[in-house]
Image (cartoon, helix red, strand yellow):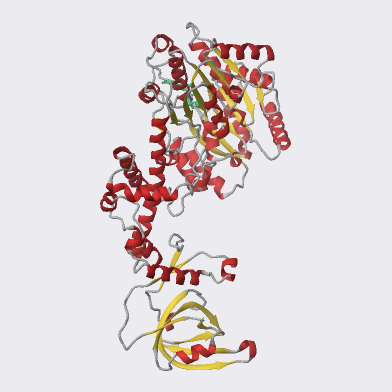
Amino acid sequence: MLEYFPFRYLDKRNITQIGGIQYNVADYLQVEGKLISLEVVGEKRGRRLVGILSDGSGEMELVWFQGIGWVENTLKIGGRYKAFGKVSFFQNSPQITHPELDLVEGDRKEVKAFFDPVYPSTEKLKGRGLGGRQIAKLTATLLGLLSEKDVDENIPQEFIDRYKLLNRFEAFRKIHFPGSIDDSNAAIRRLKFEELFIAQVRMGLRRVKRHRASRGYTFTEVGDLFNIFYKDHLPFELTEAQKRVIREIRKDIGSGRQMNRLLQGDVGSGKTIVALSVMVIAAGNGFQSCLMSPTEILAVQHHQSLSRMLKALPVNVKILTGSTRARERKKILEGCESGEVQILIGTHAVIEDRVVFKNLGLAIVDEQHRFGVAQRAKLWKKNELPPHVLVMTATPIPRTLALTAYGDLDYSVIDELPPGRTPIVTVHKKEYGRPQVMDFIKQEILKGRQAYIIYPLIEESPKLDFENLMKGYEEVKAFFPEANYTISMVHGRQKAEQKNTNMERFVKGEANLLVSTTVIEVGVDVPNASVMLIESAEKFGLPQLHQLRGRVGRGSVKSYCILSTRVNISREAKLRIGIMCETNDGFKIAEKDLEIRGPGDVEGTRQSGLLNFKIANILEDKAILEEARISAESVIEIDPELAGEQNQGLKTFLESQRGKTKWSRIS
Ligand code: ADP
Ligand code: MG
């Protein structure tokens, strides 16, 4: 009951002048005056007790339909009362039905501030006598029976002092029955802190436990392979952020414990090269590694770029997907088992049971939210010790949120884009502007650039989706006649092989245009493409739009993203498009997305529900979240056993909570 919090309070501090009550504004009010009459009127169902209260500025009726006899006997005509309740209007004059009444003793004006808690209830609960009012009464009774020593503190004193938090008992008392707004704010702050602190301590402890318990393979050296790769085969200088992340990963994989790391980075920040580097290090240490991509197109692309970079080096890289031919597949499977295949790139096919590795030491999951937990769990069975795991997010989420949601993983972030990027210009165009848009694309093609035209994927109706795309394709063909332009099309109904061939034509620059549904959403990399036209952009979510836009602006050429919509779109769609036009920063977009949709829906955290707190709101409570995080981290750092005197309350609390909350993990 103590943890069943009111959702608001009735403010009973103010006393309203009866004469000043605004006509037809039905609100909870408190008035104070003299009871000048009291009589029973009406017959049968209309029978009621009516009192008249006068405060000098005016008079109002107080009405009872029930308990008439009791009320009549209790009230004194001529007495001074405070009446509280919801005002309604009967024949143009204000009245309160079934008011709460307090006798005002003598002439003394009571000035004590007073708030009444309002609790959520349901019809069913009300039917059992547990309406809001009853819950308040029970809670009041309960609190009257308890004292500070009955409610154990679960936040170490140090933080209570540092952040000036109420103790747990006080917080419960004041959230239910605050004497002032300040009281309730202080109580709420403390309880939010507690919630965020406990969650993060719990995850931090899990991380510590994993670090200790999980022995992993040790990659002792960088390896000649990596050194040569780094010196002679990297197509560009790594950014400082990329170097730092590789260092962080190297420290993990050299430590003797299993790595379980989340890598965040905005679209286009260059996560792929980090993944490839780590796989080369693994190979140099005599371990096999695999990289899993959400789509076949992406797997093919990773395979190509890695093979290209490693061409001159003695590393065996293979690709395995759903469409790998039986004979080739057999050879690859044998190669994995014998250890001959050092790096395996692919889709889900990579973690199927029949893929047996000789010595898998590293698994990388690209664009993680598409992989289910169960699929990831399969990795654990691939070798004696679990391989190191690196999970790369497709859509970044704000750092504090990532630390909260994935606090049991280690965390790296690439917070810098490769140099020489020109920001993408994003504009919103209504459908009727399409001819100009197409003209614009023509000019870009004339400059030697390429363009994407994307149609939404309507998951509920693949048929409609296909028709949409085909209609669009015809339209595009009308603007770009086949005699002068080459158009490639990719969609979900094509066989994988066909998809790859068509994609390939675009990648190689043979096609000017790629018309597609969202199959290209994640990952593909064609630096020469400078226009991304998204049709029916109002149907896409923010992360998706940002991902799609990230397909352009990958080289130094100036790039454009055109969001085409119907003329009338919803308020939310307008908001999303506005944000897209305003910023290119994926972390900012993620934050906005969160604001619009609420934390329960963040890509990649949805399954876990980790960001849904009971009283805290991670969007509004960023400051508290940060304080709680720092506090939790300091506990984990200094006393991970929770052995210290100061942490006993916390320890006991966590033990009592065990099994009550289910925290799923992402890998
Ligand atoms: P994402 O993080 O979205 O997966 P990619 O790894 O696909 O991004 O990289 C985006 C583009 O940036 C690619 O064309 C890649 O070759 C290029 N790139 C990555 N790192 C660098 C760098 N340090 N300098 C220049 N270009 C880079
Ligand atoms: Mg990528």
Give the left or right position of residue 648, taking residue 42 as reference.
left
Q: Is residue 438 visible?
A: no
- The correct choice, above or below, for 431 with respect to 92 in the image is above
Q: Find residue 506 and report its horizontal and vertical position in percent.
A: 60, 19
- The correct choice, above or below, for 545 with respect to 167 in the image is above
Total labels: the figure holds 0
Residue drawn at (53%, 90%) of the image? 69
Q: Find residue 589 and report its horizontal and vertical position in percent.
A: 47, 39
Between 581 and 311, the one lying in front of the other is: 311
Residue drawn at (55%, 93%) of the image? 40
Between 72 and 376, the one lying in front of the other is: 376
Give the left or right position of residue 499, taking residue 394 as reference.
right
Q: Find residue 181 and report its horizontal and vertical position in percent.
A: 35, 65
Residue drawn at (51%, 35%) of the image? 546
Between 505 and 423, the one lying in front of the other is: 505
Quarter assignment of residue 144: bottom left
Give the left or right position of residue 351, taking residue 140 as reference.
right
Q: Is residue 544 visible?
A: yes
Quarter assignment of residue 513: top right
Quarter assignment of residue 632: top left
Q: Find residue 332 and report its horizontal and vertical position in percent.
A: 61, 13
